[in-house]
Image (cartoon, rainbow, N blue to C red):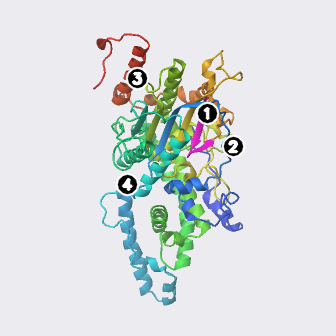
Amino acid sequence: MAPPATPLPFLVLLATLLAAAPLLPPAAAAEPEAFDVRRHLSTVTRYDVSRASNSVVSAPAISDECRVIHLNLVARHGTRAPTKKRIKELDRLAVRLGTLVDEAKQGPDTASLKKIPSWMKGWESRWKGRVKGGELVSEGEEELFNFANRVKERFQDLFDEEYHPDVYSIRATQVPRASASAVAFGLGLLSGKGKLGAGNNRAFSVLSESRASDICLRFFDSCKTYKDYRKRKEPDVDEQKEPILEHVTSALVSRYHLKFTTQDVSSLWFLCKQEASLLNITNQACQLFNEDEVHLLEWTDDLGGFVLKGYGESINYKMGLPLLKDVVQSMEEAIIAKEENFPDGTYEKARLRFAHAETLVPFTCLLGLFLEGSGFEKIQREEPLDLPPMPPQRRNWRGALVAPFASNNMLALYQCPGNDGKKTSQDQKNSYFVQVLHNEAPVSMPGCGNKDLCPFEEFKEKIVKPHLEHEYDMLCKKPVAAAEEEPSSFSSKLNFFLDLLSRKGYRVKGQDVKTEL
């Protein structure tokens, strides 16, 4: 796939932008209320803030005769603390701000000292002295816990029976914030269904694969092609961001009479996002920037997410094929169980996964969401896509909506009767439909004629099949001999089918099948 189509040179765009009328927020028509910087933090946006910002038309009505029989969930971890690397950056910023303030005090223009924000004098990072970071914070726990309660309420028919790990499979990456998110979700999902503590909680299983072999939820770790692409592309992205940073830096220098560099501004924008998202503080670092500058800085973040994780290159999302295949396989197994009338408790009803933005964004792209115009047809043909339009133009690709903390995609599989009230006779599978929900809001699928409910066979043929031209190992230049079967998932799938066979009256001898313990 060729690189994304290059827009006009950024300096030209910027000059045109600055000569134009005052900027309007990209979603002004949908957000008539006062400007809130917490809605413009790209992928550092809190989940509840993102949901409140998402103006979605009312959900399409689903016939009362349709029954949800299976649910797939792919979720990002909840709100987390800054990583160790970022904590060090904030420590350096504290030293740098102290130096800038001291230089201003020693300068001849004493009147300019009044322009320096009071919080900046003697400022220290809230995370000063921390040697570890990146953990799920209490706000992130609440995001997943409350999300689980809403899922349980929305899909009551699915979660009305006793918990069993083979019926409600919960999986997470080995990164602690992802597994902690899975635990928080599980506590919400199963609250009141056990005998532990005042909340009548119960224990549940969370499965994780080794980081080195988890090509379902951490496919980006094992994909050499992607790593090479990202290493090659990151300098280009930085270069594209530079004119924006230079413009904002110039504005801040003029406004506060401090000798900011573009690196200072980049770190101050990061501080703004951390304070606003984690601490609900918007009157310090965030107040350095006006609305126009926030929109521009948000766009630079969204640009990076688009190019390095999203539609910027087909490898970004095609490496997520193992996850897409896993989702489809789980739905096919649920359909088999329904067609064969297996009793409840003998088949999987929900497969719940918790991972990272690097997992969720490619999966979102595989489904063809958040595209502009004819973008879906382009990604099917692996043609280049234009970059997200620059403010004040509106755009679909906004990190605050695509992948905020705790963002998620749910694929609900419904069984519906035919027009005569019975299942279709020609092809029973035609009575099964897929509904996609992004951050709990039903979305129409471009690959399925913008339908809200897509027939399962059409979903496989039009959305999934075009991505299956490549195998993960070939796409990612991973030697076939080095490709490892996922032990726990293989074992669970094997046991599932052995159990089905035994229930259908078949005898399976122990020596016929070797399992990995």
From mark 2 to mark 3, how far is it between C-alphas? 42 Å
> Between tags 1 and 4, which lies in front?
4
Residue 330: x %, y % from top left: 48, 28
Which residue is denoted by mark 4 in the rendering?
134
Q: Please tell me the numbered disc located at residue 496.
A: 3
Residue sitting at 59 percent across and 61 percent down? 296
Residue sitting at 35 percent across and 39 percent down? 211
Q: Is residue 5 above or below residue 417?
A: below
The crowd level at tag 1 (other Cα within 10 Å; few <14, some 14-19, many 20+) is: some
Residue 397: x %, y % from top left: 60, 49
Which residue is denoted by mark 2 in the rendering?
373
From mark 4 to mark 3, how far is it between C-alphas? 36 Å
Marks 2 and 3 in Cβ contact (< 8 Å): no
Quarter of the figure with residue 203: top left
Please name the amino acid that badge 2 sits on. Gly
> Between tags 2 and 4, which lies in front?
4
- Does residue 127 appear left or right of residue 281 in this picture? left
Residue 444: x %, y % from top left: 65, 39
Q: Quadrant of the C terminus?
A: top left
Q: Secondary structure at mark 1?
A: helix
Res 91 seen here: yes
Q: Secondary structure at mark 3?
A: helix
Residue sitting at 64 percent across and 20 percent down? 423
Q: Quadrant of the N terminus?
A: top right
Say whether disc 1 or disc 2 marks the residue closer to the N-terminus: 2
From mark 1 to mark 3, how far is it between C-alphas? 34 Å
Range drawn in magenta: 433-442
